[in-house]
Image (cartoon, helix red, strand yellow):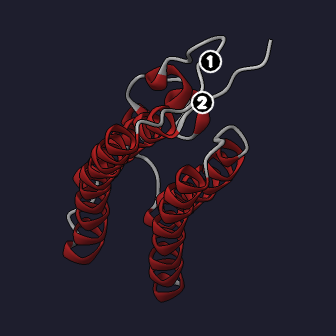
Amino acid sequence: MNVELNVFEVLDIAEQIERNGAKFYRRAAELFADGSIEKLFLDLATWENAHVRVFANMRAELSEQNWESGGFEPTRLDLPDAQVMAGLAVFGVRPNPAEELTGNEEVANIIRMAIQKEKDSIVYYTGLKDFVLSKAGKAKIDEIIAEEMRHVRILGESLEQRQ
């Protein structure tokens, strides 16, 4: 059975992924008293929360455009649950991805985990573009990918500074 996602669903999934990322980064920040690493993870959590708002705004903007133009994405045969897909996609199958962190990890290892999760999200969003039919929807997904690539760069620079 073919499943088509419209951009609204993709953005809903993106919001859940970003919420999961914020939980992960807040937990990582709790594990270290070092001001610079705590700040890095808290900044990432803040950016993830900001992305939730960006994605919500994208959905609202697209909704308004669709309303004004009278156009809507096609009906799907099956609707995925955004929370389940987000959990499976990037931050693991656990409802709370922060549970992956035991408190025994070194900073560099958590940064490596975070880089991998950000890269996984890029792959996920790139794959989701194939399910989105409209050019506007694909453009919104490209914006999401650019944000995640920025996180990879920031985390990579932080890892280099610690080596």
State the separation of the CA atoms marked 2 and 1: 7 Å
Q: Residue at coordinates 41% horizontally, 22% vertically from top-left?
A: 95
Q: Say if mark 2 contacts mark 1, CB within 8 Å.
A: yes
Q: Secondary structure at mark 2?
A: loop
Q: Is residue 134 above or below residue 144?
A: above
User: What quarter of the picture does the C terminus occupy?
Assistant: bottom right
Q: Which residue is mark 1?
A: 76
Residue 51 in the figure: left or right of residue 117:
left
Q: Residue at coordinates 50% horizontally, 67% vertically from top-left?
A: 108
Q: Is residue 85 above or below residue 44?
A: above
Q: Nearer the viewer, residue 162 or 14?
A: 14
Residue 41 in the figure: left or right of residue 110:
left
Question: Do we see residue 140 in this rendering?
Answer: yes
Q: Amino acid at mark 1?
A: Arg
Mark 2 or 1, nearer chain start: 2
Q: Which mark is residue 5?
A: 2
User: What quarter of the picture does the N terminus occupy?
Assistant: top right
Question: Do we see residue 23 in this rendering?
Answer: no
Q: Secondary structure at mark 1?
A: loop
Q: Position of residue 144 (x, y in %)?
A: 48, 59
Outermost residue toward the bottom in this view: 161
Local packing at callout 2 (Cα closer than 10 Å; few below 14, some 14-19, many 20+) is many
Q: Position of residue 81 (x, y in %)?
A: 49, 17
Q: Residue at coordinates 25% horizontally, 67% vertically from top-left?
A: 43
Q: Which mark is residue 54?
A: none
Q: Position of residue 116 (x, y in %)?
A: 61, 56
Q: Is residue 38 above or below residue 69?
A: below
